[in-house]
Amino acid sequence: MKVSRTSRLNGEYQKEVSEIIRRLRDREPELKGLISVTEADVAPDLKTAYIYVSIYGVGEAESKRTFERLQECAGHIRHELSQVMRMRTVPALTFRLDGSMTYGSKMDELFKKIAASEKPTDDPTTEK
C-alpha cells in the first residue's frame, strides 16, 4: 500500500504540533484542560494547514478562552515548527475546534441511559 506524501506530512505535522503545544502549556497558564491535536490537514502546496484540536476537561467558557489563546499562539507554534521540520516553507496554521470527542462522550452517555432503561428488572414476584 502506497502512502502519499500529503498523508505523511499530515501525520508529522500532527505529531510535532502536539509536542509544541505540550511544551507551550508550561509557559502559558491560559492553556487549560486536555488539548489534543486530532488531525492536521496540510494543503498540497504547503501554504496553509488546518490543525484540528479538541479541548477536554474544562467548562465551555474555559475551553473557548483556551482555544482563542491557542489561535493567538499560532505564529509562535509555526516558528517552533520551522525549527523542527526543516522544510523550505512552513504553512500558515489555522486552528479549528474539533468537537468529535465531546460528541462521542455525549453519545456514550445516551447509549448508557438507553441500556439502563432497557435492562430487565429482576422482580421476585413474577414467575417464569
Image: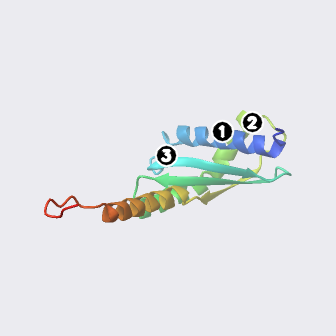
Residue 28: assigned label:
3
Q: Is residue 37 left or right of residue 7?
A: left
Chain-order first, disc 3 or disc 2: 3
Q: Are marks 2 and 1 in contact (CB under 8 Å)?
A: yes
Q: Residue furthest left?
A: 125
Q: Nearer the viewer, mark 3 or mark 2?
A: 2
Residue 16 tag number: 1
**Looking at the image, which is closer to me, 76 or 120?**
120
Q: Quadrant of residue 1?
A: top right
Residue 21 falls in which quadrant of the image? top right
Which dot marks residue 85?
A: 2
The answer, for residue 65, to whether it is visible in the render is no
Q: Is residue 47 above or below residue 24?
A: below
SS assignment at label 1: helix
* Placement of 114 over or under 13, stated as above or below: below
In front here: 101 or 77?
A: 101
Distance between mark 3 and mark 1 Cα atoms: 18 Å
Q: Earlier in the sequence, mark 2 or mark 1?
A: 1
* Residue for point 83% across, 42% down: 5
Q: Amino acid type of disc 2?
A: Met
